[in-house]
Image (cartoon, rainbow, N blue to C red):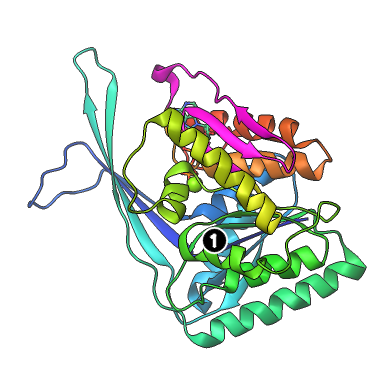
Amino acid sequence: MFVTLCLNPTIQKTLVFEKFHHAEVNRAKESFTDISGKGVNVSRVLAQLKKPVLHITQLTKEEKSFFKRELKKQKIELFSIKTAAKARICTTIIEENMSKNDNIVRSITELVENGNKVEPKTEIHLKKNFDKLLKKAKNNFKIDAFVISGSKAPGFNDSLFAELALKAHANKILTVLDIRGADLKELLNALRNNPIKADETPIIIKPNVLELKETFFANQAENSSEFFEERIKFLLMDIFEKYGILSIITRGKNSTLAFDGKNFIVMPSKKLNPAKIINTIGCGDSFTAGFVAAMSECKNFIESLKQGVECASLNALTIRPGSIF
Ligand SMILES: Nc1ncnc2c1ncn2[C@@H]1O[C@H](COP(=O)(O)OP(=O)(O)OP(=O)(O)O)[C@@H](O)[C@H]1O
Ligand SMILES: [Mg+2]
């Protein structure tokens, strides 16, 4: 069983227009409402790889049944934490125009809301339920991996992801975190005096390069890309030496940089035909799913990175974010 956690649940509204006019009334020719978010993307790709998935997120009573039904369609189980804070609603506006040679050309605009603030007891509920899940798993089923993805809604503490990751780690569960900023800094802080040892189950971080920059190189002048690659290499080695954490830094079409505890790895992205790339949103989430699925099958780090690249590339070729077919 793969356990995925995302604390910024999202309902995605997609509206399709033939023409969109600013400051006028526009009537959509089609509209869809889907569940979405980084955790849903990772869960979906894991399910597409035929892995059993339990997705944890906070939801209101009214939203729970919608999420449960939608996740069930994708063979994903839901573990919902009670809250009064509604999931944020994000809107995609797709404008479809005919090109001169009669192809449909789509322009996509994303409208993103901030998450709604959760009450303190949501975090307490989450921690209690997570403990219960780990306890239940001990005697009844194996947790293959635990994946934390994305930001969190306001109201949760910055130390929460670190706490949950360390609990999973204490239970010998492979843990991957696609987090950044204060959440990532808190994870490092938590391991400052007690780094992960070489013989323990790994904790792996997977921010993208912009998230890495924002977390560790904020306010620093832009450097040449070669120089910057060198700095990333030393940063990843430093993170391993001080905290025992392994790192993967994805960089879109540029090679992924990683440190597996022994070697610095440069894993090229696939060369994709630009005409075939439909949507690269969710490529990082698909990478995480492919990587963690392979790691759980005891493939080595490099083989697992390759499966990450494979899933990420397939995602770029599909319209739906976080999908490999
Ligand atoms: N244009 C592209 N061409 C080839 N591969 C790509 C391209 N964009 C993304 N990828 C693949 O996807 C992987 C992850 O991409 P990226 O670093 O953009 O993730 P991300 O920003 O975390 O995405 P998200 O958070 O939306 O899931 C890359 O390592 C690469 O393998
Ligand atoms: Mg990402």
From the top left corner, tell me how far across and down residue 299 is, in percent: 81, 36
Query: At label 1, which amino acid type do we have?
Result: Leu
Which residue sits at x=53%, y=63%?
Answer: 185
Q: Is residue 125 visible?
A: yes
User: Picture coordinates of residue 161 (x, y %)?
Assistant: 59, 67
Instruction: Say what secondary structure mark 1 lies in.
Output: helix
The part of the chain drawn in magenta is 248-277
- Compared to residue 279, the image places residue 70 above or below, namely below
Camera sees residue 204 = no
Tag count in the figure?
1
- Residue 144 located left or right of residue 154: right
Q: Nearer the viewer, residue 316 or 44?
A: 316
| Between 231 and 190, the one nearer to me in the picture | 231
Direction from residue 212 to residue 323 in the image, left or right:
right
Identify the residue at horizontal 62%, vertical 52% (top origin): 239
Q: Which quadrant of the figure has residue 13?
A: bottom left
* Residue carrying label 1: 184
Location of residue 86 in the rendering, given as x and y in whole percent from the top left corner: 42, 74
Residue 220 position (above or below residue 102): below
Residue 73 is left or right of residue 34, and the answer is right
